[in-house]
Amino acid sequence: MDLKVALLLVLVAVIVIGFIRKINVGLLAIAAASIVAYASGAFKAKAVISGFNSSLFVTLMGVTLLFGVIQSNGCLDLLLKKLAYLFRKQVWFIPILLLIIGLAFAAVGPGCVPALAVVVALAIPLAKHTGYNPLMLMLIGEMGTFCGRFTAITPEGILISSIMTPQGYPDIAWPMIKIVLLGVSILSVIVYIYYGGYKIKTAKNVEQMTKGDSFTSKQLIALVSILVMLVGVIGLKMNVGLASFIVAVFLLLIGIGDSKAVMKELPWNTMVMVCGVGVLITLIISSGGVDLVVDVLSSAMTASTAAPIIGFVSGCLSWFSSALGVVFPTVMPLIGGIAQNVPGSSVEEMVSAVGIAASVAGLSPASTGGGLIMGAFQGDPELAKTKSADRLFIEVFAWSVFCVVFLSILAFTGIYGLLI
């Protein structure tokens, strides 16, 4: 069997085995790449090891370390509670507020997963106080995180930049954010209308909302540290990972956060997954496997169908794997080649289609977004009585399927191209 075909089959097997056996796909990818290298004799150990992107790993670790320290002292949770309290009487603004909170929280550095947990936690008390459907608020809040995750200082943004820059597309973030914002805004309106959000005119229990305690000095320092990191990255052109390390260690030195506790909470699983899959992808690229996939996909694409096809494929793949850990590092390397093979196709549209479709597929209960919704809904005794777990599972998964299909159709209309 041709080596590049074998490696592509190995990648598929790694994803399937990881999903079925619940084993970190990054670990499987490193082991599989090593076995293929030794068995085929086509790659030396140095080639396998060099596929582990140490620069990306350090950057991801720095960003997640900083926000682990900041989040550990409760400053962000308190800030969000105060924002919700501030707009407690503008009930019409609550869904928009939750969308903005999800977007902003993800955008300033933590990325999608921590932001998902925050908006889901906020959605239930807000629903109880205002009368909105809690599932509606959770879905809209998660939509915001899907947009915010693509800034240049998030783990997702850093990963995509590391993949697209070598292909000649270093400034992909802003066009991508605009396109994704359009998509999630339309989906949020659909969710809002479906659950009758427009029927809520006044909050029913607004007097029970609380603005929380005052910020402590350590919490204020933690909040300011985010601005310091942003100044270093944007103003001084520092590497976002190294800037985050500097600020995080400073916070630990002055007693903000427990280093042992924070280190335990770092998303090691995700970081190993992202970089581990990269090891196998590097061998696939070296063998010509990516070129083969590009040729196959390109043969079925035109300028108008490139974005919807690659977006739909990414959404389907994301139902069974991690967007950040598997889909982005697997699909994004194909885009530059497809753009060359399909005249008139847009890199920005394809990158955006991959990003948003893979993200909304995460609403599936088998993924983080849907899983958090299931856990929060069924974990509340009052809400659990209103909807069975089986019914909730089907409803949330149906939204995931609808969103992927809808966005593929939206991409086909060419509307994404208007925002580039």
Image (cartoon, rainbow, N blue to C red):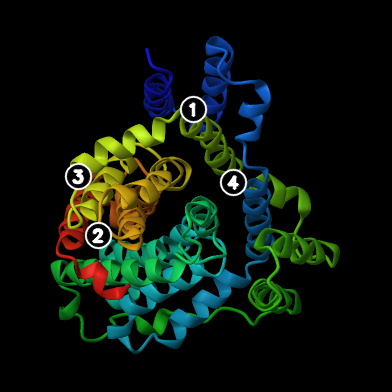
Left or right: 296, with 194 as reference point: right
Q: Which residue is mark 1?
A: 23
Left or right: 118, with 189 as reference point: right
Compared to 166, does 317 lie above or below?
A: above
Name the N-terminal-most of marks 3 and 1.
1
Compared to 334, does 251 lie above or below?
A: below
Q: Which residue is mark 3?
A: 394
Task: Kindly identify which numbered label has been placed on residue 344.
Answer: 2
**Mark 2 and mark 4: span between their CA atoms?**
39 Å
Name the N-terminal-most of marks 2 and 3.
2
**Residue under the point 19% across and 47% down:** 301
Name which residue type carries label 3: Ile
Quarter of the image with the C terminus in it: bottom left
Left or right: 61, with 344 as reference point: right
Residue 266 in the image: state x and y as whole percent: 64, 48
**Circles 3 and 1: CB distance less than 8 Å?**
no
**Residue under the point 54% across and 43% down:** 270
**Mark 3 and mark 1: span between their CA atoms?**
25 Å
Name the N-terminal-most of marks 4 and 1.
1
**Circles 4 and 1: CB distance less than 8 Å?**
no
